[in-house]
Amino acid sequence: MAKLYSFNMITLNGLFEGPTPWSIEWHTVDQEFNDFAIAQLETIGALIFGRTTYEGMAAYWPSPEGIQDDPQIARMMNAMPKIVVSSTLERADWSNTRVIANNLADEITRLKKESDKDVAVFGSANLLGSLTKLGLVDEHRLLLSPIVLERGTPLFQGIDGQLKLNLLESRTFKNGNVLLRYAVTA
């Protein structure tokens, strides 16, 4: 069975975006990160997004800007099977995307069973909270950026009590980012 993991860039104080949606200008992206992102995308069989993250990704990756800035990543993101979890989105126009509105636990469990590769959630803090509560997330991959923001949106929302994690890997990037991979423990 495939693993479901989240991948997010976060600040030192646990924010995944600044004070407004898509306020991510603080992300530090360079060739080392792009190489990492490509290697990570090669291991993914499907991506899962909440509506807000989906709309931002769908606006960027198929666009001329996305294709010009990161052609290999854009090609992979555009070809990847994608799922949007939303009760309000009526249709998804980005290639290889389907919308699910009901039976989240059943749909994601089936996807994990059927996938030959891992399944990943990018961004999508609200959805990530729901998936975590349902016990469907196996691993969290956090790219810790060396910055603190005064205000913003915390990544882990709606988590009841504690979420216990076991460190699997840490990796320091030359630009100061640190990748932390944590397995969710029972």
Image: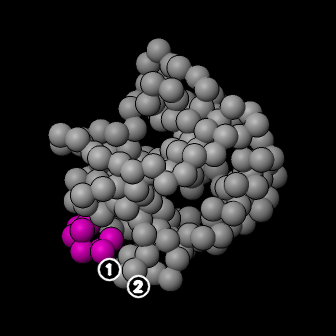
Identify the residue under disc 2. 114
Where is the N terminus found, in terms of image quarters? bottom left
139, above or below 158, in the image: below
Frontmost residue, 96 versus 140: 140
Identify the residue under disc 1. 110
Task: Tell me where the magenta segment starts and ends, as one range.
Answer: 102-109
Amino acid carrying mark 1 in the image: Arg
* Residue located at (29% from left, 47% from top): 164
Frontmost residue, 176 versus 71: 176
110, above or below 129, in the image: below
In-image side of 110 versus 162 (left or right): right
Q: Do the residues labelled 2 and 1 touch (CB within 8 Å)?
A: yes
Amino acid carrying mark 2 in the image: Glu
Q: Is 104 inside the magenta-drawn segment?
A: yes
Note whether residue 19 is visible: yes
* Residue located at (65% from left, 36% from top): 177
What's the coloring here?
one colour
Place of residue 80 in the rendered image (x, y in percent of width and height, measured from the top left): 59, 71
